[in-house]
Image (spheres, rainbow, N blue to C red):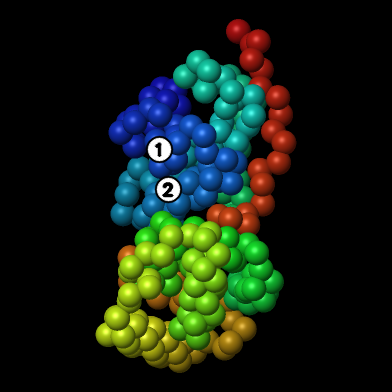
Amino acid sequence: MGLLERCDEFFKTSNLYEVLGINKEATEAEIRRGYYKVSLTVHPDRAPEDPLATEKFQVLGKLYAVLSDKEQREVYDEQGVVDEESDVLSQDRSWEDYWRLLFPKITMQDILEFEKKYKGTDEEREDLLKLYVKYKGDMDAITVSALCCSQENEPRLCGIIQDAIKNGEVEAFPAFTKENDKKKRARRKRADRERQEAEEMQKEMGLGDEDDSLVMMLQQRQKSREQSFNSLLSDLEAKYAKPSGKSQKSKRGKK
């Protein structure tokens, strides 16, 4: 059974882009991000109850290998087929090792270093305004999805948005400009509660500030959030993962 048939069997669509939840015009970064998100749902370590998890994971690895290879992607986009005999798919590869190569483990030190470099940059500002537009000024959704966002940072982020509104860069959504104090207080209470839960979990697990296991604690904490895939860890791993590199040329003329 070929890759497209396997996708249809496991993910109810033979469209490679639809499997990853992206469109045909997706950038390389968006493809990698889509692969990361979907692969997490079927990773054998994260879905031990699914007897087909390993097979699904392998299929996703092959799918990503096709879409991340320029020639293979062109063939698929133009003809809607996949060259099953290409080097990209025929080579003997450990798809778990391939996944880990793309998405190396994120440690607490990585998070802290990223936070220092990210805050106050044009990139942070651009990401924030995209979220503002996406959620039409809903600060609850924005603060959940924004990278490196804490309650202490909210006034600064609001200032960035207010300046952008003043400069005509973004629309003045009522959800932002007319947000009532009750909603703001509820958000502060929620942030305080999450912080307390994290501190209690840290004590229960006997973790130190530099312990890599803090990452696991953060992941556990993110499970309660509506936008779980937009958590700091998943965004970091998907956005700043190592590129797959140049693959060998596909044997398009092979018969």
- For the question of whether residue 70 can be seen, the reply is yes
Residue under label 2: 38
Residue 246 placement (x, y as % from top left): 72, 36
- Please identify the quadrant where the C terminus is shown: top right
As measured in the structure, the alpha-carbon distance from the residue carrying label 1 to the one carrying label 2 is: 8 Å
- The residue that appears at 60% across and 41% down in the rendered structure is 28
Amino acid type, callout 1: Val
Q: Residue at x 55, y 65 (%)?
A: 167
Q: Is 205 located above or below residue 241 in the figure?
A: below
Residue 6 drawn above or below residue 95: above
Q: Depth check: 230 or 125 in front? A: 125
Q: Residue at x 56, y 33 (%)?
A: 67
Q: In the structure shown, which secondary structural element does the residue marked by tag 1 occupy? A: helix
Q: Find disc 1 in the rendering and name its residue.
A: 19
Quarter of the image with the N terminus in it: top left
Query: Badge 2, how many Cα within 10 Å: few under 14, some, many 20+?
Result: some
Q: Quadrant of residue 135?
A: bottom left
In this orientation, does residue 150 appear? no
Amino acid type of the residue that numbered disc 2 sits on in the rendered structure:
Val
Q: Decide: marks 1, 2 in contact (CB < 8 A)?
A: yes
Give the image location of residue 83, x and y in percent.
55, 19
**Residue at 52% from the left image edge and 49% from the top image edge:** 33
Residue 248, percent from left and from top: 71, 29
